Amino acid sequence: MVMLQRFVFKRLRLFYSGNQEITKSLLTIFPAALLDGHRAAGHRAKSSLPDFKERTLIAVKPDGVQRHLVGQIIQRFEQRGFKLVGLKMLQVSEDLLSQHYCELRSKPFYPQLLHYMTSGPVVVMVWEGFKVVNTSRMMVGHTNPAEAKAGTVRGDFSFHISRNVVHASDSLEGAQREIQLWFENKELLTWDCCDQKLTCEEE
Ligand code: TYD
């Protein structure tokens, strides 16, 4: 009911937005709580705007490319409603990879990881959307596919940690660092997707 009232109020306000007197009288008719609700919604829209612009880096690793999984992985992010803003295929250099995995250089598995990640092309992407970093991690699943849930990328397409098909940034800061590392600004597009109004409420 309150939603309906807000909707009617918004429409009336838009309709009379050219006439300040009528708008003022409308403001006196509508209950304060409703107006507060409207203001809160306006505030929410402003403060949450960056969430909708959140970006993350997803990479299909060499095993995923070799196994023809690129399309299926892209499809999962598309059908979830996220927006693709960058995409390319490349043969990764050891230098780029050592920067990407800088925190893992001392790990015993690092040499094998380096070898595997440079063994063939990868497809790297930037996806944009509400809470995309966390949601992508959930969609990708546990680092170790043996523990990844069915329905996740790793849980559906792999069984061993040494070949886990896909990379997803693990935090907002990590995503920003990785996107800058893998992409130049000019390779990332800002564009309006026509389904934007269908995937979340527009305030
Ligand atoms: P990590 O950053 O810990 O995981 P994630 O990819 O889920 O963010 O590790 C990077 C990659 O290193 C991981 O995807 C697969 C590989 N790896 C191993 O081969 N063996 C291991 O024991 C671990 C922890 C990771």
Image (tube, rainbow, N blue to C red):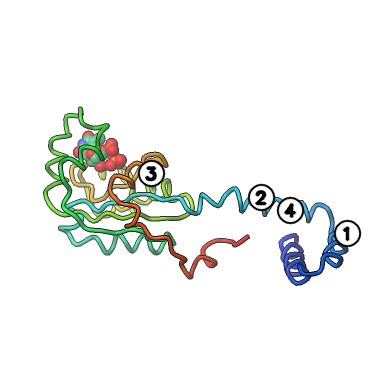
**Residue at mark 3:** 176
Q: Would residue 12 be found to the left or right of residue 59 on screen?
A: right
Instruction: Determine the quadrant in which ligand 1 lies.
Output: top left
- Residue 11 placed where, x, y %? 73, 69
- For the C terminus, which image quadrant? bottom right
Structural distance between the alpha carbons of marks 1 and 3: 47 Å
**Residues packed near mark 2 inside 10 Å, few (<14), some (14 to 19) or many (20 plus):** few
**Residues packed near mark 4 inside 10 Å, few (<14), some (14 to 19) or many (20 plus):** some
**Residues packed near mark 1 inside 10 Å, few (<14), some (14 to 19) or many (20 plus):** few
Helix, strand or loop for disc 2: helix
**Residue at mark 1:** 28
**Residue at mark 2:** 43
Foreground residue, 188 or 134?
Answer: 188
Mark number for residue 37? 4
Residue at the (15%, 40%) spot, across then down: 114
- Looking at the image, which residue sits at the far top? 106
Q: For disc 3, does the CB lie below 8 Å from ligand 1?
A: no
Helix, strand or loop for disc 3: helix
Q: Would residue 71 be found to the left or right of residue 200 on screen?
A: left
Q: Looking at the picture, which amino acid does disc 2 mark? A: His
Structural distance between the alpha carbons of marks 1 and 4: 15 Å
Q: Quadrant of residue 4?
A: bottom right
Which of pointers 4 and 2 indicates the residue nearer the eye? 2
Q: Looking at the picture, which amino acid does disc 4 mark? A: Gly
Q: Earlier in the sequence, mark 1 or mark 2?
A: 1
Q: Earlier in the sequence, mark 2 or mark 3?
A: 2
